[in-house]
């Protein structure tokens, strides 16, 4: 799996609004499942948009390390985690320090 | 381009090409004029008796100036055809009709059925405009 | 309170049916997101950072207990057990599923509510004085006029695609509790020497990127010509407002660029024409609406004295109770600003509790304030202690109204896709730093307002202390503003200088309050002291350390 600076695809589930990430095969709610979309990004987006399952699809910058995928912009990190002021509703409800990851 | 016009008038359509508001002032024989969003519809008021068709262009549906242009013309007694052209979507038809438009030439064709459905969206209306529909307040307080 | 008749109900029911059809077509793939987006936005359904957000209109901030209860039930049924009351007297839900949105709207319609025109470049929900019909200083009850406005602005065919969104506020007191001069149109109901009512129109105010205080355009418009005057104001704007740049598209820019006199001239010309068209609802309609806002059956024998022997209760009464027009009654402000909490958020249980309190003690009525608090407008003083105890139990007896802990904050980058920085964590840290109520009371009235971006939903320009979150190379940064104010003496805050990080801004706020405490003259509020001594002493205190270190 490619590490370092990567391009990943994100969007929202059309029906539920959930934030989702492109895994190469489908969509996951967990950013660590996101894969480098590379030169195929536009084709993936066009194909997935046609399925009308995920909306607002777009490519963002991120970094992959051994710890996982970290979106480059704070807005996308908050999207990946959930509201930092309601960690109980985030994807890491058991981790009281989860909010520090977004900074 | 296939020209599709939804027309809600009984008279014969005007064949003349529509000229710009500027050109219209100089052409005493012109009967059709086209209003762009930035044009002042009031410039046509002295000439309403010789106009048979006013086209109001909507380059983008989000530009709502044409609604005011249409109402101004109707409020001053214009009875000829008032046609909305351009980026005219089914979701705008009802409001356009309420502002006095009685024909529509959308860039993307709209089926007659969809248009008919759009005109029945609102069972009642809160405002008096130029379409003759009684406002809700008028129904509450019949004269 | 106003109640729908069959016409009003038919309109919201038609809207629910229309939206249900649109959602079905979207889910079936019959229409694209590009086609669907403007349709869902017309129903207040945004796609935010984490999910769909629904903004529900609360017309002029007024709710019955049945409606409030429904808002609580909706939070449980369709969301995650809470809602967020906004600076426009509305409520937002943060976790709505598209497929359930039509059912939610149907539930709202069952209690005469909707999400119509809570987004888009149209006339938004009208806001009003939260103490309308109850305040001791009221000249004219603005609610009947606000309801007239609601009906006129709903599905207005000419003004659905304005250059930009359009916000109207209406008040009927000398005291402006609705930030009326910072709206596209602010209407103040006034009386002349002959005792006749008139509408004073302030047009072209606003916050956002270019904050402006609205000038008076119509000094005394007869109430039975209010709708015609509005038509004229809106038509001039719709025709001539700028559409080339969304940041210059609000009416304030038009009024500013052509000047208040020229704008007024155009409005007067249009107004004279519109008066000939008979667009105005008849006097009988205003009278019909006024009938819904008659005083409830106040008890003339309600005792006026209050037992303040419980010191905590006494503090709450001193801070959160406002004078009522009837002896023996009081206006209760429920602060949704607990120390360390999220400004404006309330759980479904809290919402239902407030509904119950309204039902049992406030003639079935509640109000939402632009400061993101809740009001029980008509409470017997004899019931205050019982109410306070119930609020205390539910974590709602925060005795900090208009104090530094009563912070206005937009949702910020924790929820909002437009935000550049988080607002809520800053509000939480400041409210914790000033968590001691004695310290807050020592500072007195101090309105602190935080926005997470330049759109200014958190009204930072109008805060005695304002905070604006910006994005500085991908890092959250906070600018400090001082001297803003809403109300009769409206003023706009000035930026102190370079911004701060999250902890830095909390320290800076503390230093600013220290300067105030050291410099204030007797009876001066923070903003008064600022106006007297100017920015310099505050700047020196805030930036002293940085300067010393080079």
Image (cartoon, grey):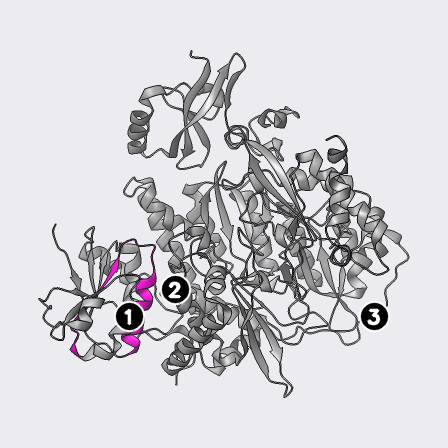
Tell whether B143 sits left or right of C369: left
What residue did someone put label 1 on? B41
Chain to which the residue tagged by mark 2 belongs: C
- Position of residue C11 measured from the top left corner of the image (x, y, whole percent): 40, 63
Q: Residues within 10 Å of mark 2 (few under 14, many from 20)?
A: some
Asked if labels 2 and 3 share a chain, the reply is: yes
Tell whether B34 sits left or right of C257: left
- Per the image, label 1 sits on a secondary structure element best described as helix
- Position of residue C522 measured from the top left corner of the image (x, y, whole percent): 86, 60
Which residue sits at x=27%, y=66%? B97
- Position of residue C90 measured from the top left corner of the image (x, y, whole percent): 56, 54
Q: Which residues are magenta?
A: B50-76
Chain to which the residue tagged by mark 1 belongs: B
**Which label sits on residue C304?**
3
What residue did someone put label 2 on? C240
In magenta stretch: residue C183: no
């Amino acid at each position: 799996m490619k590490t370092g600076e990567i391009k990943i695809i994100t969007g929202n589930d059309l029906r539920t609004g959930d934030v989702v990430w492109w895994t190469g095969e489908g969509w996951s709610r967990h950013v660590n499942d996101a894969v480098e979309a590379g030169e195929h990004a536009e084709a993936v987006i066009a194909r997935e948009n046609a399925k009308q399952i995920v909306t607002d699809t777009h490519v963002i910058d991120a970094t992959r390390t051994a710890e996982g995928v970290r979106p480059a912009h704070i807005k996308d990190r908050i999207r990946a985690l959930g509201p930092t002021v309601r960690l109980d509703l985030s994807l890491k409800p058991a981790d009281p320090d989860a909010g520090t990851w977004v900074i | 381009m296939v020209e599709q016009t939804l027309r809600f008038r009984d008279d014969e359509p005007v064949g003349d090409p529509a000229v710009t508001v500027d050109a219209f002032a100089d052409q005493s024989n012109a009967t059709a004029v086209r209003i762009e969003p930035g044009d002042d519809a009031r410039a046509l008021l002295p000439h309403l008796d010789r106009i048979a068709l006013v086209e109001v262009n909507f380059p983008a549906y989000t530009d709502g100036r044409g609604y005011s242009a249409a109402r101004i013309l109707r409020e001053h007694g214009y009875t000829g055809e008032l046609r909305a052209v351009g980026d005219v979507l089914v979701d705008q038809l009802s409001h356009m009709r309420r502002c006095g438009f009685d024909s529509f030439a959308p860039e993307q064709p709209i089926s007659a059925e969809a248009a008919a459905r759009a005109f029945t969206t609102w069972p009642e209306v809160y405002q008096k405009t130029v379409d003759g529909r009684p406002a809700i307040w008028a129904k509450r307080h019949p004269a | 309170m106003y109640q729908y008749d069959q016409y009003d109900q038919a309109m919201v029911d038609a809207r629910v049916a229309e939206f249900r059809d649109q959602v079905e077509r979207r889910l079936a793939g019959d229409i694209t997101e590009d086609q669907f987006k403007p349709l869902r936005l017309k129903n207040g359904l945004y796609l935010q950072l984490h999910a769909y957000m629904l903004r529900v209109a609360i017309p002029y901030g007024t709710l019955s207990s049945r409606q409030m209860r429904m808002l609580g039930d909706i939070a449980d049924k369709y969301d995650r057990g809470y809602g967020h009351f906004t600076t426009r007297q509305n409520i937002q839900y943060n976790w709505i599923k598209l497929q359930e949105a039509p059912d939610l709207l149907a539930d709202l319609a069952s209690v005469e509510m909707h999400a119509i025109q809570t987004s888009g470049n149209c006339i938004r929900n009208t806001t009003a004085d939260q103490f309308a019909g109850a305040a001791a200083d009221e000249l004219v009850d603005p609610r009947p006029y606000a309801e007239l406005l609601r009906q006129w602005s709903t599905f207005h065919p000419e003004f659905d695609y304005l250059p930009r969104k359009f916000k109207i506020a209406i008040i009927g007191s000398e005291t402006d509790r609705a930030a009326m001069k910072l709206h596209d149109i602010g209407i103040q109901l006034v009386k002349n020497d002959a005792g006749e009512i008139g509408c004073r129109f302030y047009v072209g105010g606003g916050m956002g990127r270019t904050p402006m205080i609205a000038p008076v355009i119509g000094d005394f418009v007869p109430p039975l010509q209010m709708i015609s005057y509005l038509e004229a104001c809106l038509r001039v704007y719709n025709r001539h407002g700028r559409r080339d740049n969304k940041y210059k598209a609000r009416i304030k820019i038009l009024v500013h660029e052509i000047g208040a006199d020229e704008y007024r001239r155009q409005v007067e010309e249009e107004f004279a024409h519109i008066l000939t068209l008979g667009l105005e609802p008849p006097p009988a309609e205003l009278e019909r609406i006024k009938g819904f806002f008659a005083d409830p059956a106040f008890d003339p024998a309600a005792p006026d004295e209050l037992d303040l022997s419980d010191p905590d209760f006494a503090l709450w009464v001193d801070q959160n109770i406002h004078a009522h027009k009837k002896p023996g009654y009081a206006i209760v402000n429920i602060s949704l600003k607990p120390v360390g909490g999220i400004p404006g958020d309330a759980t479904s249980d809290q919402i239902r509790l407030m509904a119950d309190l309204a039902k049992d003690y406030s003639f079935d009525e509640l109000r939402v304030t632009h400061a993101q608090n809740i009001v029980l407008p008509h409470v017997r003083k004899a019931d205050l202690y019982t109410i306070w105890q119930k609020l205390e139990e539910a974590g709602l007896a925060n005795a900090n109204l208009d104090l530094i802990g009563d912070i206005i904050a937009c949702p910020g980058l924790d929820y909002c896709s437009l935000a550049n920085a988080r607002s809520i964590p800053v509000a939480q840290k400041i409210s914790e730093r000033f968590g001691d109520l004695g310290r807050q009371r020592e500072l007195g009235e101090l309105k602190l307002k935080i926005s997470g971006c330049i759109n200014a939903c958190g009204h930072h320009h109008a805060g005695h202390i304002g905070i604006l979150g910006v994005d500085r190379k991908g890092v959250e940064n906070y600018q400090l503003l001082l001297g803003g104010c809403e109300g009769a003496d409206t003023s706009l805050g000035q930026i102190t200088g370079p911004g701060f990080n999250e902890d830095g801004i909390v320290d800076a706020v503390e230093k600013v309050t220290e300067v105030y405490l050291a410099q204030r003259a007797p009876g001066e509020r923070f903003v008064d002291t600022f106006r007297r001594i100017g920015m310099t002493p505050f700047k020196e205190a805030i930036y002293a350390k940085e300067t010393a270190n080079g």
